[in-house]
Image: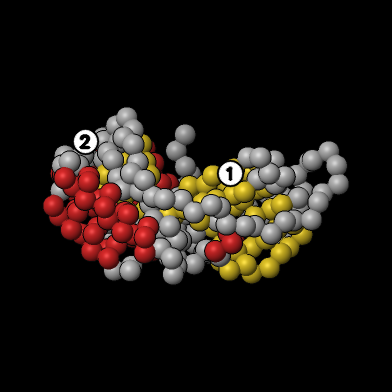
Amino acid sequence: MSAPLTPEADTAVLDIAQRHGLSRDAVVSMLVAVNAGGGTMAQFSIPELGGSGQWMRGGMTMVGNMFDNALKARVDTLCNELAQLLATMTVFPPAAAPTGGFASNNWWPTEFGSPSSSGGQNHVRYAIFPAARRLAINIDGVVRIFDTGEHNIGGVQQQQGTAYGLVTFTSQFGTFDVSSLQELGTQPGDAPATGGHPEPAPAFSAPEPQVPQPQTAQPQASESPAPLSPTGSDDSAGIISAIESLAGLHQRGILSDEEFVAKKAELLGRL
């Protein structure tokens, strides 16, 4: 089922679909993916665009056939146009919210709008708000609010084996947890059913440092270098390792000369 659109956005999507020779559903699927990536990145699986792929504004575009440069250019043009659409008009109808501080069926503050992604496991729940640059974490009814800064969160992981679970996120800067973000405060929320009395929310701690590794090839998806760790004073080794991974992909013919030079320059700029 396609995501609901405002009448103005639906007219724009139909026009974009006609100009790009795509179905409305394909354009809406990509629109949802670009919106989930905060307008700067997208992960998608659309048969009309070669299956699975990834897009990052100003960066690399990857499609199922890594040598199909025409398809890469088509995806890049489409995603940039959809990002502009998201920035210039209301695309998705706002969710109805009650007058209180929290939505009736949700635990996050209503002033952030609708999250691009939300979920949870055991005692921990999360909600991501790219437009507001906010991340909400609910631990046994205590909602902690964080400023996501320049992170465009595209993935969430939760480790097992601890009392609360440790939530980590991935963005264009790599994998990180909330200990690297600025906490803006806490608010009371509804607690998940635990069968007992809630314990105080523990302080988040950073996960063990991870050495970036090249990603293994997935069906219908091209290989890409490992994500970088969040920017900081000790990320030089991670950046150098990522450049070495890029060089390996370039030698194997997976990255073109232009893609390798552009990405290498971007990484060197972060040193």
Q: Quadrant of the C terminus?
A: bottom left
| The one of 210 and 24 positioned closer to us in this rendering | 210
Residue 2 drawn at (x, y percent): 44, 38
In the image, taking residue 241 as reference, residue 149 lies left or right, namely right
Amino acid carrying mark 2 in the image: Asn
| The one of 175 and 244 positioned closer to us in this rendering | 244
Residue 173 drawn at (x, y percent): 41, 58
Q: Can residue 19 be seen in this snapshot?
A: no
Nearest-to-viewer mark from 1 and 2? 1
| The one of 154 and 270 positioned closer to us in this rendering | 270
At 18% from the left and 58% from the top, the residue drawn is 261
* Residue 143 tag number: none
At 40% from the left and 63% from the top, the residue drawn is 235
The residue carrying pointer 2 sits among few (fewer than 14), some (14 to 19) or many (20 or more) residues within 10 Å by Cα, namely some
At 41% from the left and 50% from the top, the residue drawn is 211
* Residue 158 tag number: 1
Q: Residue furthest left?
A: 257
In the image, taking residue 223 as reference, residue 205 lies left or right, namely right
Q: Can residue 187 be seen in this snapshot?
A: yes
Question: The residue tagged with tag 2: helix, strand or loop?
Answer: loop
Alpha carbon separation for disc pair 1 and 2:
31 Å
In the image, taking residue 28 as reference, residue 94 lies left or right, namely right
Amino acid carrying mark 1 in the image: Gln
Residue 245 drawn at (x, y percent): 28, 49
Which residue matches tag 2? Answer: 65
Q: Earlier in the sequence, mark 1 or mark 2?
A: 2
Q: How many marks?
A: 2
At 68% from the left and 44% from the top, the residue drawn is 162
In the image, taking residue 77 as reference, residue 213 lies left or right, namely right
